[in-house]
Amino acid sequence: METVFVNLKDINGDIKIKYTGIYDEKISKIMFLFWQIQEQNEIFVAGIVFEMKEKNIVYISILDSTGEFKPRNMQKGFINDTILALLKYLSPTFLEVFSQPKKEIIFGKSSKNTKKGFLNSHKLFKYWKNIFSKYICCENKKEYKLYIHNNTDESNGIPYHRNTKLNDIYLFDDDPKQKLINNLEENVDIYNFFSILLFRSDFSNGSLLFNVCPCKKHNSNINLEEFNLFDIKEILETLRGLDFSDYQNSLKSTIFFLKKYQLKSFLFKTSKSKLSENIIETPIEEQSFVKIKTKSKK
């Protein structure tokens, strides 16, 4: 992967991270798994799944960690920089995520690990807003627009014009929009559709975030020869069936998984400075075409 990732160092020297990329053409998803070399042992620390529509349309489907990254106080920085590096690698012009807290979604029993942190809906929303505000791949950073759709005062609309047909919006597997469309009994316009979405039980504490660049000129760096071609659903099923409840179990589960699948992997490439130092900190402009009235709070 021709991408500079993260150079992390602690008092004991370099932090060594390996990763593997998995591509599933049937469902148009890419998965990245990360593990850390700790005292000659390899242990999973994080995983993320992206769903892609066309070349530059990306949905962040899944993000999870085990809580076993060391040192613990650098885990957030590692995951933040890694997500941003992967986004620069994928280089989407349309980026979307549904922010909704889940205690575990990749690594089985990791919710029982006392070292694993959890974010409530508000903190998770702030987390993704920060990531989306920093993701910029275009030379003209003013091109970017950040859209937020939720039941809070920060909701500012959606990246679609009022006359957009529902058939023309982007839908993804783990997307609340997809679930709503499957249950619609009558035709509605896009304004009413996104308003109805706010009242769904699976959306009440969630947030949709969009990062959109109208230029549509990004050049993706994806080289599928670097990926393992595999069934991501099977990979997820295996990981969810393992035990990541503590260090010893996480170690055993990592060894079992890596031995079973024999996936080609790579060491992180590093630079002299941390990736975060090269990321533009100025938040991108928040703008909307369609304003959606949020659900009133009683």
Image (cartoon, rainbow, N blue to C red):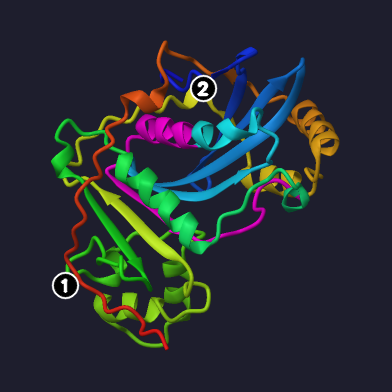
**Image quarter (top left, top right, bottom left or bottom right) of the C terminus:** bottom left
- What is the spatial separation of the Cα atoms under label 2 and label 1, in whole angstroms? 41 Å
Q: Where does residue 81 sit, x and y in percent of width and height?
A: 45, 32
The residue shown at (29%, 81%) is 192
Q: Based on the displayed image, in which of its 4 quarters is residue 14 positioned?
A: top right
Q: Where does residue 16 sit, x and y in percent of width and height?
A: 62, 17
Question: Height in image: 57 above or below 229?
Answer: below
Residue at which label 1 appears: 163
The residue shown at (37%, 51%) is 129
Tag 1 or tag 2, which sits nearer the N-term? 1
Look at the image and give the residue range highlighted in magenta. Answer: 80-109
Q: Is residue 224 left or right of residue 119?
A: left
Q: Is residue 77 left or right of residue 17?
A: left
Picture disc at residue 132: none
Query: Can residue 159 be seen by looking at this rendering?
Result: yes
SS state under label 1 = loop
Between residue 42 and residue 297, name the one nearer to us: 297
Question: Height in image: 116 above or below 297?
Answer: above
Residue at which label 2 appears: 226
The residue shown at (31%, 61%) is 148
Question: Height in image: 275 above or below 62?
Answer: above
Amino acid type, mark 2: Glu
Q: Where does residue 288 sit, x and y in percent of width and height?
A: 19, 62
